[in-house]
Image (cartoon, rainbow, N blue to C red):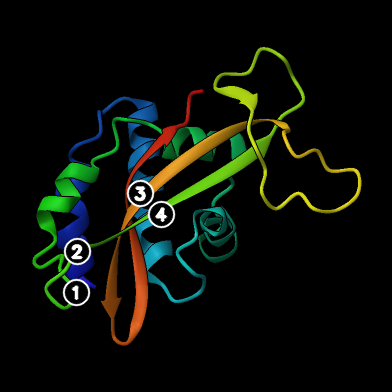
Amino acid sequence: MFILRDLFSPLQEEFSNNEQGQKRKVWFAYTLLAIVVPFTSSIISNLLRALQTLFGLDIQSQRFYTFMASPTLPWKTMWGMIPSPETEERIFVALDDSIKPKSGRKIFGCGHFHDHVAKGRNQSSYPWSQCILAIGLLKKVKERWACLPLDYRFYMM
């Protein structure tokens, strides 16, 4: 476990010392642990469930997605800490989009995005929603694929 402490210390130093920064520092460390632990796949929508189930964190989904879409998370610092990002001499990058349907009108980043999985009855093909894009590094770890998220952004039409 000393390895994790040595990895998390420089990443946690990137956060401010105010109350919100201290909270985000803890959330970031637990999010990285949720990615590493083989409890769930590294799909972004499962991270919140892993944080609540494994670590007992009480985070509202809206606050978690806002946190993950923040441009101030130290992903660039983390990228520099990866000793060899290549797999078979190539760098594999994955792009994931998540559509979060909303019902209010004055919500940041909302638009009518195409939902390609809305095939059932009473589902709109273009719901009023937020679209969050994530990019991650795919790396093979002990014969399993892991996705290390590198950046998140709201997709703006």
> Dot 3: what SS?
strand
* Badge 2: residue crowd in 10 Å (few <14, some 14–19, many ≥20): few
Decide which of tag 1 and tag 3 comes sooner along the chain. 1
Could you tell me which quadrant the N terminus lies in? bottom left
Residue on which the image places disc 1: 87
First in residue order: circle 2 vs circle 3: 2
Relative placement, left or right, of 63 versus 111 is: left
Q: Disc 2 marks which residue?
A: 91
CA separation in Å, label 3 and label 4:
15 Å
The residue to which callout 3 is attached is 135
For label 1, count other residues whose C-alpha is less than 10 Å away and answer few (under 14), some (14-19) or many (20+): few
Amino acid identity at mark 4 = Thr
The residue at which mark 4 appears reads as 31
Give the mark nearer the N terminus: 1 vs 4.
4
Q: Secondary structure at mark 4?
A: helix
Amino acid type assigned to the residue bearing label 1 in the image: Thr
